[in-house]
Image (tube, rainbow, N blue to C red):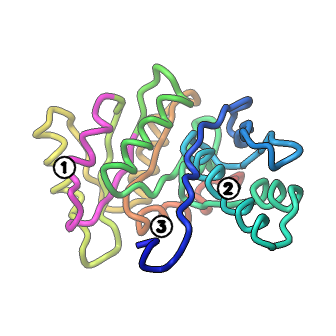
Amino acid sequence: MCEELDAALYNTVMPVKLSRLDFSGQTFVFPTKSMRQNAIFIPLLGEYQAQNAAMAINAAIILRENGYCITDEQIKNGLANVKWPGRFEVLHDFPKILVDGSHNEEGVEMLCTNLKQYFPQKKVIFIVGVLSDKAYKKMLMNILPIAKEIYTVTPRNPRALPACKLAKFFGEEGYPAVACDSIKLAIEVAQKGATEEDIICIFGSLYVIGEAKNVLKKLLPNLK
């Protein structure tokens, strides 16, 4: 494709070294001689986000080398102020409540990797809703080893997989799930049984994430 477009191909994959990691974000060292200060902060969670940021930095450096006026400070400020709603987004503490729009196998694998990294040795209370045209069975197998409880919901979409059908799938895999009539009910039931040390993860279709965030705003006045 690059030959067809007479465009240069750049290999921008390079390792990044995390130097700080918490729920406000992460700081990583970007190995390049093109920036005077290569410690970069991003307010996003998940190691893959550092890799994404490194690729964006490389793109900015390439543009700079080709005549664009992009300063180190602009790069750092841009990354420090980036927002990605619905991607491993922590909305509440005690219990931790987070939302994630992962809706394919690779995305759910990464979600589980992040949960294990930020909450090692802990089981998770899941609330999940998916669309019926997704390969949901293979995708959702990833959460079973770390699931404490599972609540299923039906996204507000004509292509939604019914909560009862999703709960049946989990039951057939040996993990009983509770099908809920609404996202509001699922959140209320999950919260009622959760301790301050628990993690509630709401994930799946972005239709679920959007509705869940609206519900949480009404239920929890101190939402982040």
The residue identified by callout 3 is 211
Secondary structure beneath dot 2 equals helix
Q: Is residue 29 left or right of residue 217?
A: right
Instruction: Give coordinates of residue 67: x percent, y percent.
Output: 81, 73
Secondary structure beneath dot 3 equals helix
Q: Are marks 2 and 1 in contact (CB under 8 Å)?
A: no
* Rendered position, 204 above or below 95: below
Q: Earlier in the sequence, mark 1 or mark 3?
A: 1
Q: Residue at x 87, y 62 (%)?
A: 71
Q: Residue at x 65, y 52 (%)?
A: 53
Name, please, the residue furthest toward the top.
Answer: 121
* Image quadrant assignment for residue 27: top right
Q: Earlier in the sequence, mark 2 or mark 1?
A: 2
Amino acid type shown at disc 2: Asn
Q: State yes or no: residue 143 in magenta.
A: yes
The residue identified by callout 2 is 58
Q: Is residue 204 left or right of residue 14?
A: left
**Which numbered disc, 1 or 3, marks the residue closer to the eye?**
1
* Rendered position, 197 above or below 112: above
Amino acid type shown at disc 1: Lys
Which numbered tag is attached to residue 186? none
**Which numbered disc, 2 or 3, marks the residue closer to the eye?**
2
Q: Earlier in the sequence, mark 2 or mark 3?
A: 2
